[in-house]
Image (cartoon, helix red, strand yellow):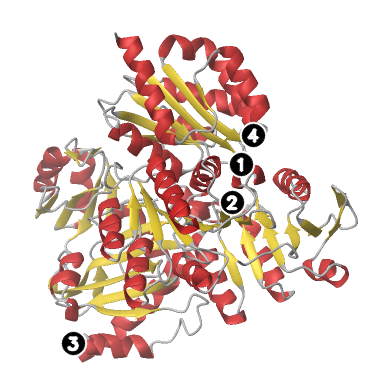
Amino acid sequence: MYIDKNTRVLIQGITGRQGSYHTQKMLDSGVAVVAGTTPGKGGQEVCGVPVFDRVFQALDQHPADASMIIVPPPFVLSAAEEAIEAGIKLLVIITEHVPVHDVMRLKAMASKKGVTFIGPNTIGIIAPGQSKVGIMPTFLYGQGGKVAIISRSGTMCHENASNLVNRGVGIGAVISIGGDPIIGVDFVEALEHFRHDDSIGAILLIGEIGQSREEKTAEHLLEHPYPKPVFAFIAGRYAPKGKKMGHAGAIIEKGMGSAKGKIDSLRRVGVKVAMSTQQVADELSRWQEESQQ
Amino acid sequence: MYLREHQAKEILRAAGLPVPESRVVFTPSEVAEAARAIGPCVVKAQVRAGGRGKAGLIALAQSPEEAAAAAQNILGQTHQGETVDRLLVEARLDIARELYLGVVLDTAQATPRALLSTKGGVDIELVAAERPGDLYQMNLDPLQEGIKDLAPWRKLWNQAGLDPDLQEQASKITVRLMELFFQAEAFTLEINPLVVTRQGRIVAGDCKLIVDDAALFRHPELARFKEVDENSLEARAQKIGVTYVALEENGTVGVMAGGAGICMTTMDEVADAGAVPAAFIDLGGGISEENMAAALEVMLATPGLDALLLNVFGGINNCEIMARGVRRMWPSLKDKVTLVIKMRGHSQEEGWAILQELGVPLIKDGTTTEAVRLLMERLEEVRS
């Protein structure tokens, strides 16, 4: 997983309403939040965490492994650039409505510098029982286990993780990759991340209509057979064509990116696609029972 | 945001790209006047959807009288849900051949991708599907390195088979278009047809421009084209920072959730249970008590609504605040709809307490499937 119990987290935008609220929540669940930044607010403290004007100033005194960016959309690109220049290798961008051209630039920059970023428009990542860089209610995700969830939708992480936890299925990792047209880590990269991770026994992919991330994932799985069972769920089977469904990316046009196409292509490569949230919970609890025998 | 043709061409003109002389008009008499000034012209309906030619919404006119007659016929027609309320009167081009030039955001590779073809003027998706060899493609550097270079475009137009004496002109237009794509923060910028006139000039015959709504804050030149029907439920929802999506006209069930993914999932499961979803509201993040109540009010204004499923998480939102919003709207809610709420997350105990006091059927630990099942049971009880 990208994070573990030793991960030290910086929060960019820590003095904002959302920033300070989630800093407290992260501290409450035992995350090592070492510093925060907000230009012009250096010298302050938020929930006991020291605030700096600039990322490099924060890192001079408080080395960090990851940065959570929770600044308003117009400032996301420069915040991310600042973190990359200061040497942070993992960025989690919570902000929604980030201009897509900004994310495209960021993606090019990050790939040149070997930086991993997650989001934007994500609830972040969590290794239950260990750490999180995100805004999810920690208690919904349990205390650890063998299932990894990779999802385009943040709230669908809450839904499925909590359903699984309620059924006694343990979750080892959750990555909310975000629903925007251009994102950092995607399904394929996240799947590869877990390929050789022995702590993860099964994967749940949560996709939705629009674009072709799920179809591309199916192609990838065909070319690179996966050593663990992969389950999936696709939202938007009933969505009317040509209508934007909220997420910038969730729109079907001219038969591209339909739920049916995604479900068919995933099933064709052996992914078990569930048709309801109940079925997701049923199938994964059956998997857990069988794998424990 | 989809721009209308005349808006997109205004942007092209401002960027120094060649477009025909034209005027935007709203009445047949204005059309005649424009045609007098312009000469032989094309009268084009200014709707956003494609397929205008086939629908008879584009007419050629030799005289002001012909233009006025065409306008009479086109104005007020409906095309894919849009009523024609304005026309573009444009100078007729003496067409020798038609090219295609476009650039789209390739979201999978996270780069813009330029597309060009000497087989323009037709549905380019068909060219791509049936004769992919006729469509020439090149990905651009997102960091815009080398964006002003003409050489790669000369080469590509040459490969595409464009007449050598047109290659320089076409390449300059291509460079300008690519620059404009970045400047406008476009998703799609397409000129089809890109007309070559008998006089050897290259001119934009039509233009499709889709820009990023999230970037409009730094583009006043584009933001002024934003049109909203102030009274629509979509616009009312937008004002309070939530997204309203109308679904089926004969729908009776409203869905409210935080995030497009769970909205769509809930809608799917409602439909699977045999009910018809009428609309959903995506609450997004950071909702206040006031806005929660206002969002419920918008949902209640949906025609035909008799049931509501609230499927929410306290993530970036807070359960207690959302429950207080429900309490505010409770008098109207309990009279109008059968309500089921599934809620968990931050401050769930406080939220549950408020809802239990109101007597709302509540799912705490169940799945969305179970919440839909409970709603269906309640509806059955109400209807029997």
Q: Is residue A30 above or below residue B119?
A: above
At 64% from the left and 34% from the top, the residue drawn is B318
Query: What amino acid does circle 1 point to?
Result: Gly
Q: Is residue B229 above or below residue B362?
A: below
- Label 3 and label 2: CA atoms lie apart by 49 Å
Q: Position of residue A219 (x, y in %)?
A: 32, 71
Give me the disc on residue B161. 3
Q: Residues within 10 Å of mark 2 (few under 14, many from 20)?
A: many
- Label 2 and label 1: CA atoms lie apart by 8 Å
The residue under label 2 is A123
Q: Which chain hosts label 1?
A: B
Secondary-structure class at tag 2 = loop
- Label 1 and label 4: CA atoms lie apart by 7 Å
Q: Which chain hosts label 2?
A: A
The answer to whether A283 appears left or right of B126 in the picture is right
The answer to whether B192 appears left or right of B73 in the picture is right
- Label 1 and label 3: CA atoms lie apart by 56 Å
Q: Are marks 2 and 1 in contact (CB under 8 Å)?
A: yes
Residue A49 seen in the current view: yes
Q: Position of residue B332 (x, y in %)?
A: 49, 12
At 59% from the left and 71% from the top, the residue drawn is A116
Q: Residues within 10 Å of mark 4 (few under 14, many from 20)?
A: many
Q: Position of residue A22 (x, y in %)?
A: 72, 47
At 42% from the left and 68% from the top, the residue drawn is B181
Secondary-structure class at tag 3 = loop
Of circles 4 and 3, the one toward us is 4
The residue under label 4 is B318
Q: Are marks 4 and 3 in contact (CB under 8 Å)?
A: no
Query: What amino acid does circle 3 point to?
Result: Gly
Query: What amino acid does circle 4 point to?
Result: Asn
The residue under label 1 is B315
